[in-house]
């Protein structure tokens, strides 16, 4: 019966999975912002060696399926399922964010650099206090879109035994395997994923409207 799916213990089981999903997503996002920003700045740098090295990393990572990183980190390191998922997703997501940051830096006109230089500011000060804040403001929608992708992509880590939201839905499917129950179960899981992603999307639109006005 469909109503069996909505027993308190099943809903709590899924909510515990959601907590794992959000833990992985938030940790991945925070780490990827830090690493991705550094990589993006390096890729944008006038130092050719630094730009090339970061470019090799970014292009190498972005052109390999994230699932391979998840499998590699899980089975080639002593890290547990959750931590390995965070590490693997950070490796991949930081490369994506690096390209977003680089695009943001490229969107800032050369006049900003020249104006700062005329005021006696050095390159690093100009980057940190003038150029980077403007670039981050410009790329907010793209960053939020990537954050939404991260939340959804946490579903890949169930493949290595992580009991996040999708993983726990698979476990429940073993007990509720009637086609109608399965359809209802995954409809419920989709709705649960939708809520945090909708909140992020709404925040991005609100932020964009605030910037434009």
Image (cartoon, rainbow, N blue to C red):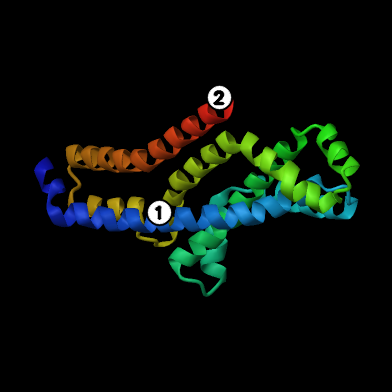
Outermost residue toward the bottom?
Answer: 78
In-image side of 200 versus 58 (left or right): left
Please, is residue 65 above or below residue 162 in the view? above
* Mark earlier in primary sequence (1, 2): 1
Q: Residue at x 67, y 43 (%)?
A: 133
Q: Is residue 121 left or right of residue 138?
A: right
Residue at 30% in and 52% down: 170
Q: Residue at x 68, y 38 (%)?
A: 134
- Where residue 108 appears, x then y in whole percent? 76, 34
Q: Position of residue 183 (x, y in %)?
A: 24, 37
Residue of label 2 = 213
For residue 88, which numbered disc appears in the image? Answer: none
Q: Residues within 10 Å of mark 1 (few under 14, many from 20)?
A: some
Quarter the C terminus occupies:
top right
Residue drawn 26% across the image and 53% down it? 14
Between 176 and 197, the one nearer to me in the picture: 197
Horizontal and vertical percent position of residue 101 = 68, 43
Furthest residue to the top? 213
Q: Which quadrant is the N terminus positioned in?
A: top left
Please give the residue where the numbered disc 1 appears in the rendered image: 22
Task: Bin the neighbour count of mark 2 within 10 Å (Cα to Cα): few under 14, some 14-19, many 20 and up.
Answer: few
Q: Is residue 171 visible?
A: no
Quick check: 20 left or right of 140? left
Q: In the image shown, does 40 or 12 lie closer to the viewer?
A: 40
Depth check: give the residue in front, 17 or 103: 103
Camera-near label (1 vs 2) is 2
Residue 94 in the image: above or below residue 140: below
SS for tag 2?
A: loop
Query: Residue 95 at x, y = what percent?
Result: 66, 49
How far, Cα to Cα, is label 1 from label 2?
Answer: 32 Å
């Amino acid at each position: 019966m469909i109503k069996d799916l909505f027993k308190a213990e099943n809903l709590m089981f899924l909510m515990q999975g959601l907590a794992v999903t959000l833990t992985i997503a938030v940790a991945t996002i925070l780490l990827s912002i830090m690493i991705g920003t550094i990589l993006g700045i390096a890729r944008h740098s006038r130092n050719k060696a630094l730009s090339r090295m970061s470019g090799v990393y970014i292009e190498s990572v972005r052109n390999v399926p994230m699932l391979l990183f998840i499998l590699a980190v899980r089975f080639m390191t002593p890290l547990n399922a959750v931590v390995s998922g965070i590490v693997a997703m950070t490796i991949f997501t930081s490369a994506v964010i690096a390209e977003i940051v680089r695009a943001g830096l490229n969107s800032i006109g050369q006049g900003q650099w020249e104006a700062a230089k005329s005021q006696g500011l050095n390159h690093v000060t100009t980057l940190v206090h003038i150029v980077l804040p403007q670039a981050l403001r410009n790329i907010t929608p793209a960053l939020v879109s990537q954050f939404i992708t991260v939340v959804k992509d946490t579903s890949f880590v169930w493949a290595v035994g992580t009991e996040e939201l999708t993983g726990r839905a698979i476990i429940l499917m073993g007990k509720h395997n009637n086609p109608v129950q399965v359809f209802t179960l995954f409809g419920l899981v989709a709705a649960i994923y939708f809520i945090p992603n909708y909140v992020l999307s709404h925040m991005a639109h609100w932020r964009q409207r605030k910037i434009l006005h």
